[in-house]
Image: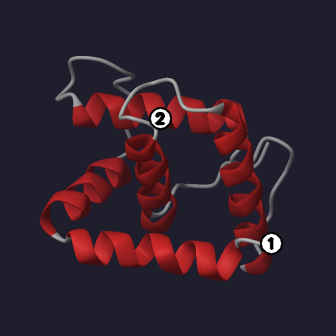
Amino acid sequence: MIKVKWDLEEAVVLYDLYFKSGATLSVDTEKLNELSAIMKNRAAVKGGQIDEKYRNVTGLTMQIGCIHYVVTDGKEGLSNVSKIFYEAYDLYKKEPMKFNQMIEEFYCKYKR
């Protein structure tokens, strides 16, 4: 299994999906599948090594749990949060225009 650290762009896009899904742990599987495919395409475009587990729905769901933990101030969700998810939430709160620009660029560049 290839372990690839999450980067800010990926974290921001996952936050976007989380918020658009009503800021709950139940994110539509179809939407997760779609995002997973785009993230895999992004990795391919960037020349990264991926396997069948790379940014799969199970992994994305787990990270949504981490995001939920950050957003609820540790009241709910998964506590094993990567620092990058705190940074992404910080960006969301302090620089919403930059946050939204990252989302737009991500989909423009990597969505087929």
Residue type pointed to by label 1: Ala
Residue 75 x, y percent position in the rendering: 21, 17
Q: Taking 54 as reference, is 39 above or below it?
A: below
User: As rendered, which of 7 and 73 lies closer to the eye?
Assistant: 73
Pick the quarter of the image with the N terminus: top right
Pick the quarter of the image with the C terminus: bottom right
Q: Residue placed at 78% from the left, 67% from the top?
A: 41
Residue 55 x, y percent position in the rendering: 68, 47
Residue 109 x, y percent position in the rendering: 65, 82
User: As rendered, which of 49 and 35 lies closer to the eye?
Assistant: 35
Secondary element under disc 1, as helix, strand or loop, is helix
Residue 18 x, y percent position in the rendering: 43, 41
Q: Taking 77 as reference, is 28 above or below it?
A: below
Marking on residue 64: 2
- Disc 1 marks which residue? 44
Q: Residue placed at 52% from the left, 80% from the top?
A: 105
Left or right, 93 with respect to 52, comes to left
Left or right, 67 with respect to 59, comes to left
Secondary element under disc 2, as helix, strand or loop, is helix
* Residue found farthest to the top: 75
Q: Residue placed at 46% from the left, 70% from the top?
A: 103
Real-space Cα separation, disc 1 to disc 2, in angstroms: 23 Å
